[in-house]
Image (spheres, coloured by chain):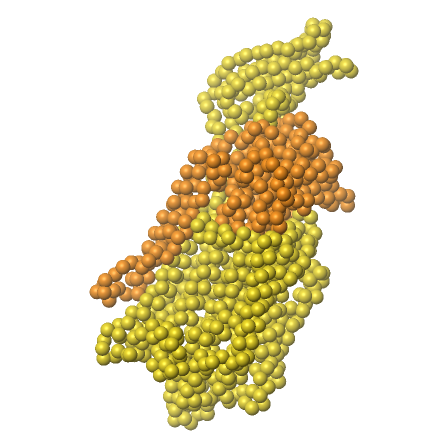
Amino acid sequence: MSTDIISTDALTTDVITTNTLTTDARAASLRPFGKPSLLWWVTVVALALVIGAGIAAWVVQLKSGMGVAGYNDHAFWAIYIADVVTFIGVSYGGAVVSAILRLTGATWRAPLTRLAEGTAVVTVLIGAALIVPHIGNPVRLYELVTHPNLSAPVFWDFVAVMTYTFASIVFFALPLVPDMAVLHQGHEQSLGKRRTTLYAKVSRGWTGAPKQRAVLAGALGLVSIMIIPLAVSVHSVLAWAFASTDRPWWHESIWAPQFVVAALYSGVALVILVLAGFRRGYHLQGLITPRHFIRLGFILATFAATYIYLTFADLLPGSYVGEPGTASVFTDLMVGRLALWFWMFAVVGGLIPLLLVALPWTRNVTGMVIAATLVLPMMWLKRFLLVVGPATYDTVTRTFGTYHFTWVPIAITLAAAAAVPLLLMLLFRVVPLLSIDEIEEIAQMQEIGKMEKSLTARPHSESGEPTQPVDHHGAPVGTTTGTSHRVAGATGVLLLVALMGMLGIGTAHPASAAIPHVASVSSSVRTSTGAPTITIKGVEAGGKVQLTATLTGANGKPQADAPVVFSFNTTQFGAPARPVPLGSVTTDKAGVAKLILGADANHLYQPTTKGPQEFGATFTPTTADAKPITASVTVNITVARSAYTPAPPKPLAGLGNGLVIALFAIVAAIWLTLIAQIWRVRRVRLAAVQEPATSTT
Amino acid sequence: MERQDAMQDRTTHPEEGLASPPPAVTLKERQALSRRLLLGTLGVTAAGGALTMVSYQDDAQAATTSRGVSAAPAATGAEHAWCMVIDLRLCDGCKACTTSCQTRHQLRPEQTWIKVTEMKDAAGGTFNMPRPCMMCEDPPCMYICPVGANIRTDEGLVLVDTDACIGSRACMAACPYEARYFNWTDPLPQKRMPTADSPQMPVPQKGTVGKCVFCADRLPHGELPACVSGCPMGVLYIGDLVTDTAVNGQGTAVVLSDFLRANDAVRYKEELGTNPRVYYILGHGQSLGGGA
């Protein structure tokens, strides 16, 4: 890389003539198809060994349980979910470089798009695969399809990741058609047998006719528009898997946008690294210039600044208010256990990359590569901190548990990291490394642009760069812009509403009352001789049970001013029947104590089941050795009411079903639109085969 | 099988709502078919599929309700609404409840389905607080489980189907009461369990989550949960909101509503809207509010 800095002027190297570009692009794309160098083999074997170690670690974890990965009940989520977020996050880099630059007509993207899109596909697949070690019971993952819970963010995570993966594969695959046609027609000898067969199949019928180009451009424009809200949805739903729980720092509204920006930030960094690696390995210096790195560096700096801002905005309000949970987690993060790591992230992962781009003397390929190299592990660290901080915080005891790294998750994480270059190296043994067609097309246009400029005698400048003449923003694209934004907006709103609780609890009052009438009366008396006696009568009148106890003293006269405890007997908690005290009533002069159930605020109990119900009256004499005396009566209850009133449903609970229908409709529409794009391109390609004049061999 | 009966039916089939194939069109029709029309058709198809699925889910839910188990408790007038009352004035922190529970459910020592925590009170002293599962009426764990492995019986018991649990631990994140415990390693060797494996009496399984079940297998037989019968202080009451009664392990029975009212019972983290079914009776200066 040092040679680049010495030998090339960053500001002039993107002026390359059309012929050089075209030849270079084709030759460069064919370069990986030759006999692999020793270095290639060494790299592949080394990476494969790292992945093998990761798989071995995963097998160990499967056998012994997740405990070997350092997990415990006080650290239930940790490194794997941070890995998932990181890897799915970096996948957004492909989308930003390719889709956003395509939509904004930035022509300089041409040599980068294929590598960026390939990175997007590879990383999202690795990220999705990392869910497997994260799950305690991976063999049951099929349940996400066979019986999902539609109110669960994790289920919608799965839907969003699958949809985004499909979209990124379509976005990667569609532009392969013209490139494979170019290589198949002119460079068969360099392709080899298998690639020739593949390329022939994929590009069959592609002539590059204006109609074909228009259809492909339209399809790509549409997918470009779709992939941006899709990526936003993926990172948002990932964030909501955290934010829809009641944990300090997770339960934050800023999380979804913060995840999106984090994904963009780390994604651009990975694109820079991948570009640097392939540029060096396959000698693409003529195509991927320092200028590209610097432009990507500016994008990186934009996201660095945004992410630093969001981090500050995330932490300030919670720190300011000082709620116990949030304050504990933030203290732990900023001045406690995790402080070293957090500030390392802030400086090494935020400030230094920003400075490397901002300072003119580090704004070169080396500087950008260093910045990207710092950003990627630091963004992983940030994800790890934001997972492990709240996950280890016990919201009941308000103490922190600990997560201990073991070799198992480290091996798996390294394997995932090694899989990125390995899969990319293997991928570009099969498909062209560069989007040849796009490069050639843009180069032609630049040639024209330059001629026009020389006519007006204006010096070539960056601002004068011609825009891409092929219209990616035609009418069909324009109409879908609104749709896509509505899709994104609706998805966001609907998912938020889902968190309010999809499955509300219905209101109903069990055990409705019957028509009140006088019930049967039966009475039984139990007395002890030579002691006070007690009798009880029970009657159900007008829907209310009235209990009357009469207390007779040892002298045979009614006993006044004595407390009589009424009770009912229940066998609900086992035999023998337990007396449940209903309250105490003092006898009057006639020795009578009366209790009407549910009549006053102190005696609210009313019978809850119909049928015979035993009631009792107990008097405990005040003399020392006297035993309590009890009389009981069975009343046939005809009017019962349940004492239980269910909680009212949540205010937005009723929206659940409509939300699910809308979401599924949106997801289905996205999938079908994507399939339709493949179908369109295929149709226009094969239509040419049927016309003999334009047929190709 | 008993297990089948006790389980909530699996009610959702997303494939019905996803990716229905594009409508078949002939070559002539294809030429006439604009993209917008195509998209419109596809959208309607998709919405139709999703609608079918959701209404199917409702039907299935209604069907399970009539069989006695559903996610909408008490809507049909359940016979019981189990709850617990914990009288903190009496708790001396002996942890007999935890031990009884762990013995009965054959749990590892760190799996404290009922956990006694020493909490600070407002005066700077401490009090002991047993924490079982709160059996929320709006259980965050149930809503967040990606595969519906958390179920709620119509008697209000939130249970885990360990044969469906994929081990995502989303419920552990969602539970505001930290009431869930994961089987991070192989469970302890199982002695004879009192009943067959069921959500009511789960046998610990590696890679799945477990939690307090209120000894759901005992309640229908009028038996007390292990912690309630094991508490020597009579701190823990098992109760029924429908029949308005509660008893503790020391033979005390109370009219539930009167007891709660007379003692100013509160629910833990009431402000979260989970509507827990565990009531605490506080002594002096204790505080159970205050979010996370």
State whether residue A418 is above or below residue B19. Answer: below
- Does the rendering let one see residue A390? no
- Does the rendering let one see residue A285? yes
Residue A107, position as x, y percentages in the image = 43, 80
State whether residue A609 is above or below residue A142. Answer: above
Task: Name the residue: 66% across, 57% down.
Answer: A403
Viewer-proximal residue among B49 and B274: B49
Residue B34, position as x, y percentages in the image = 28, 65
Task: Name the residue: 66% across, 17% down.
Answer: A618
Viewer-proximal residue among A526 and A557: A526
Task: Name the residue: 48% across, 57% down.
Answer: A158
Viewer-proximal residue among A430 and A2: A430
State whether residue A697 is above or below residue B224. Answer: below
Number of disc labels:
0
Residue B72, position as x, y percentages in the image = 48, 39
Left or right: B235 as drawn, with respect to A483: right
Rendered image quadrant of residue B219:
top right
Rendered image quadrant of residue A261:
bottom right
Viewer-proximal residue among A378 and A264: A378
Left or right: A165 as drawn, with respect to A688: right
Chain A: what color? yellow
Chain B: what color? orange
Task: Name the residue: 56% across, 66% down.
Answer: A51
Task: Looking at this view, name the residue that lies furthest to the left.
Answer: B28
Residue B235, position as x, y percentages in the image = 69, 34
